[in-house]
Amino acid sequence: MLPACCDRFRRYLRPQIEQYLRTDVGQPYRDIAAPTPAGDTLSLRQAVEDPANKCVLVDFWASWCGPCISGMNRIKQLYETYRAAGLEVIGVSLDSRREAWLRAIEKEGLPWSNISNLDGWQTGFDSYGIQSLPSFVLIRCSDGQIVARKPWGRASHIPVGEIEKLLGQ
């Protein structure tokens, strides 16, 4: 029999591990939807099912996250290079302050769609088991399968090789 502290620890970790495994490489993506800066609701499904897209890079970020902001230029380079070939990027912000979120989008000149529930870590995006920022998930649009994921990292950790493979580059 486990001590009480181990049982509490296991009960805490089990749902997080199961959640992470449901969105690990090889699993189908899970749809998320949230408001855009304009107030419209955008879902990940819309990007995945768009026939113009071959893959979708989901970038989990926040305006207050230094590594997220410092990596935006790298993501912009990838987007500009591969957008015409079928790469889509969806920025999913874990911000809680609308003004900070909008200011970061404008300041960084983010050309892709961005969504946020503006409730920080209490967000509905927890279906991806995000525990740190930035985090990335790469989805193959032809079958909706997650083909790469980085639970944390810098823009240099984006799976460029996998993106190029999916785009036939």
Image (cartoon, helix red, strand yellow):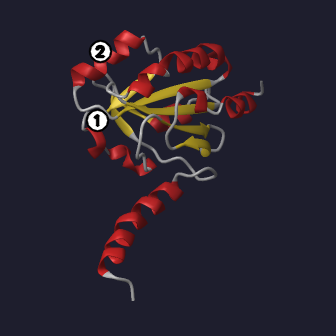
In the depicted view, which residue is nearer to us: 139 or 161? 161
Q: Residue at x 46, y 61 (%)?
A: 17
Quadrant of residue 16 within the rendered picture? bottom left
- Is the residue marked by circle 2 packed among few (<14), some (14-19), or many (20+) residues within 10 Å? few
Amino acid, disc 1: Asn
Q: Compared with residue 126, is residue 153 higher up or lower down, i.e. above or below?
A: above
The image shows residue 66 at horizontal and vertical percentages of: 39, 25
Query: Is residue 129 visible in this depiction of the protein?
Result: yes
Quarter of the figure that contains the N terminus: bottom left
Q: Compared with residue 114, is residue 34 higher up or lower down, i.e. above or below?
A: below
In this figure, which residue is indicated by the disc labeled 1? Answer: 117
Quarter of the figure that contains the C terminus: top right
Q: Residue at x 26, y 21 (%)?
A: 100
Distance of label 2 from label 1 (alpha carbons): 16 Å
Q: Residue at x 52, y 26 (%)?
A: 89
Q: Does residue 166 appear left or right of residue 99 in this picture?
A: right
Label 2 element class: helix
The image shows residue 64 at horizontal and vertical percentages of: 32, 26
Q: Does residue 135 appear left or right of residue 65 in this picture?
A: right
Amino acid, disc 2: Arg
In the depicted view, which residue is nearer to us: 157 or 44? 157
Q: Does residue 168 appear left or right of residue 49 in this picture?
A: right
In the depicted view, which residue is nearer to us: 161 or 36? 161
The image shows residue 70 at horizontal and vertical percentages of: 46, 20
Quadrant of residue 162 within the rendered picture? top right
Give the label on residue 103, or none.
Answer: 2
